[in-house]
Amino acid sequence: MMEVTATETPSAPYDVWIASYGYTVGAAPALRSADPDGDGQSNLAEFAFGLDPTANSPNPITIARSNTTVTVSWLQRNDGSATYTNRSTTNLTTGFPAGNSTNFPGSLSANTNNLPRPEYSRYQFSTNVSAFLRHFYKVDAAEAP
């Protein structure tokens, strides 16, 4: 008699990441759209921005201001498993335009403090806001195909 058993070995970066938190790949709490910790961030967003899907997470994008300079920073995966688009607008009524903001390109930050795992890097962009009455920024992430 011969018996063969198989266990699912996570291979996609998302699957490896979610399994590292003790979730079963493909089961309800591990689904990309799930939010098991109830913090308003889907598992996929937590994966993309280096957050913990088992604990209430802060906003993944931080904004710091020093006089007239605003710096927007976020964590992003450095293994190509997610894509990021930073956007800006002066009017929320018309929304954010498609594609990356050419005015505020993100770049790798020199700040490597408190990175959650080796596959994450901190990115940022800075701008002088003295000429703006108001400006809005956001960073979108998607799982790479």
Image (cartoon, helix red, strand yellow):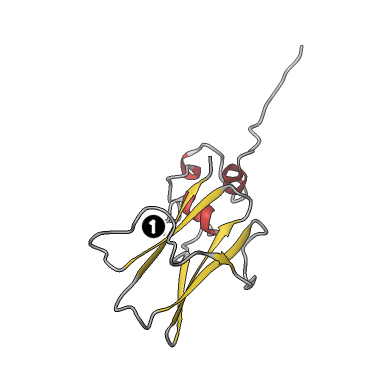
* Quadrant in the picture for residue 13: top right
Pointer 1 residue: 40
Position of residue 10 measured from the top left corner of the image (x, y, whole percent) = 63, 38
Q: Nearer the viewer, residue 135 or 102?
A: 102
State the residue at coordinates (33%, 78%): 132
Amino acid at circle 1: Gly
Q: Is residue 16 visible?
A: yes
Residue found at the far left of this picture = 93
Q: Is residue 7 left or right of residue 98?
A: right
Residue 13 vs 69, above or below: the answer is above
The crowd level at tag 1 (other Cα within 10 Å; few <14, some 14-19, many 20+) is some
Q: Nearer the viewer, residue 100 or 138?
A: 100
Q: Nearer the viewer, residue 100 or 121?
A: 100
User: Which quadrant is the N terminus positioned in?
Assistant: top right
Position of residue 47 measured from the top left corner of the image (x, y, whole percent) = 53, 52
Position of residue 5 measured from the top left corner of the image (x, y, whole percent) = 69, 24
* Quadrant in the picture for residue 122: bottom right
Residue 94 vs 42, above or below: the answer is below
Judged from the image, the secondary structure of the residue bearing numbered disc 1 is loop
Q: Is residue 97 left or right of residue 86?
A: left
Q: Is residue 71 left or right of residue 19?
A: left
Residue 128 vs 140, above or below: the answer is below
Give the tally of numbered discs: 1
Q: Nearer the viewer, residue 107 or 141?
A: 107
* Quadrant in the picture for residue 16: top right
Position of residue 104 measured from the top left corner of the image (x, y, whole percent) = 46, 67
Residue 57 vs 29, above or below: the answer is below
Q: Is residue 53 visible?
A: no
State the residue at coordinates (60%, 40%): 12
Residue found at the far top of this picture = 1
